[in-house]
Amino acid sequence: MLDMQKIVVLTGAGMSAESGISTFRDTNGLWENHRVEDVASPEGWLRNPELVLNFYNIRRRQLKEVEPNTAHLSLVRLEKKFDLQIITQNVDNLHERAGSSKVLHLHGELTKVRSTGDPRLIYEWDHDLNLGDKCQKGFQLRPHIVWFSEEVPNISIAAKYCNDADILIIIGTSMQVYPAASLLAYSRLDSKIYFVDPSPNLSFGVHNFPNLEVIRATAGEGVPMLVETLLKH
Ligand code: APR
C-alpha cells in the first residue's frame, strides 16, 4: 500500500474557542484577569503558589463543562485517509476527547500534575490540586504545564513532524509565542500549508511560504470545509 500522506496540524487557543474556552490574546483574553507573570511563570509559582494552583484549578474544572467542537471532530475524519499528527499548544484534552489518536502537547496538559522534586513523576489529575498534595517522594505537586521561560521539551520532535509533513494545517494561533511559532519554518518548501484563523497574524511573512493558503474563517467553519476538500482528493 502506498505510504499515506502525512498531515501535521498545529493548533492554538482558537481551536478551542468555539468550545467555550477563552483564548489568550483576543479581547476578553484569559490572561486579563491575571498578569501572565503571576500565574504562568516559575517566579509566580514561588511568589504565590495558591494563586497559581487556583488559576489552574478553575481551568481544570472548566474542562468538565466543555465539549470538543466540530473542528476537533472533523480533524478525526482525516485519520481515515492520512497519517495525521496533531501538535497542540493547548493544554485542554479536547483533541483526545474528540478521538484524535496522535496528539503532541507542546505546553503541557491540564489533566496532569508532576512532582516539584522529581519531574519524571507525572500523574493523571482530574480534580483540584492544592498545597499539601504531594508526590510519592513527598514533594509538592505542580501543574504539568510549560510556564513562560521554561523549556518546551517536545519542540524538537514537533519540528521533525513539521519537516516530515506533506501538508501542514495551522489553526487558531496568533503565532506569537516561541518556540511553537517557529514550527512553520520547519515545513518543507514542497509541502502545502493551510492557515485557518478569522483574523490571521501573518507577520511571519506569507511571501516566505509560496504554498501557504490562508482561510479566513473560524475553526468551526473553516476546518470541516478543509477536511472535506482533503478527503475528496
Ligand atoms: N477559530 C479559529 N481561530 C480563532 C477563533 C476561532 N473561533 N477565535 C480566535 N481565533 C484565533 C485568534 O485570531 C488568534 O489568532 O486564535 C488565535 C488565538 O491566539 P492566542 O490567544 O495568542 O492563543 P495561542 O496562539 O494559542 O497562544 C499561544 O501562548 O499564552 C500562551 O501557552 C499559551 O499556548 C498558549 C500560547
Image (cartoon, rainbow, N blue to C red):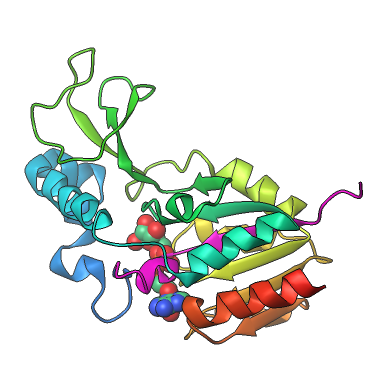
The answer to whether residue 175 is above or below residue 196 is above
The answer to whether residue 37 is above or below residue 69 is above
Measuring 16% from the left and 54% from the top, which residue is drawn there?
Answer: 58
Hey, which quadrant is residue 196 in on the image? bottom right
**Between residues 203 and 26, which one lies in front from this camera angle?**
26
**Between residues 72 and 52, which one lies in front from this camera angle?**
72
In magenta stretch: residue 17: yes
Hey, which quadrant is residue 32 in on the image? bottom left
159 to the left or right of 137: right
**Residue 221 visible in rendering:** yes
12 to the left or right of 54: right
> Which range of residues does the magenta coloring cover?
1-21
Tell which residue pokes out farthest to the right in this image: 1
223 to the left or right of 211: left
Hey, which quadrant is residue 213 in on the image? bottom right
Measuring 14% from the left and 41% from the top, which residue is drawn there?
Answer: 128
**Residue 204 visible in rendering:** no
Give the image location of residue 230, x and y in percent: 74, 71
Give the image location of residue 140, x and y in percent: 17, 25
**Between residues 221 and 175, which one lies in front from this camera angle?**
221
In magenta stretch: residue 176: no
Image quarter for ligand 1? bottom left
Give the image location of residue 67, x and y in percent: 35, 62
**Between residues 214 and 85, which one lies in front from this camera angle?**
85
Give the image location of residue 86, x and y in percent: 58, 53
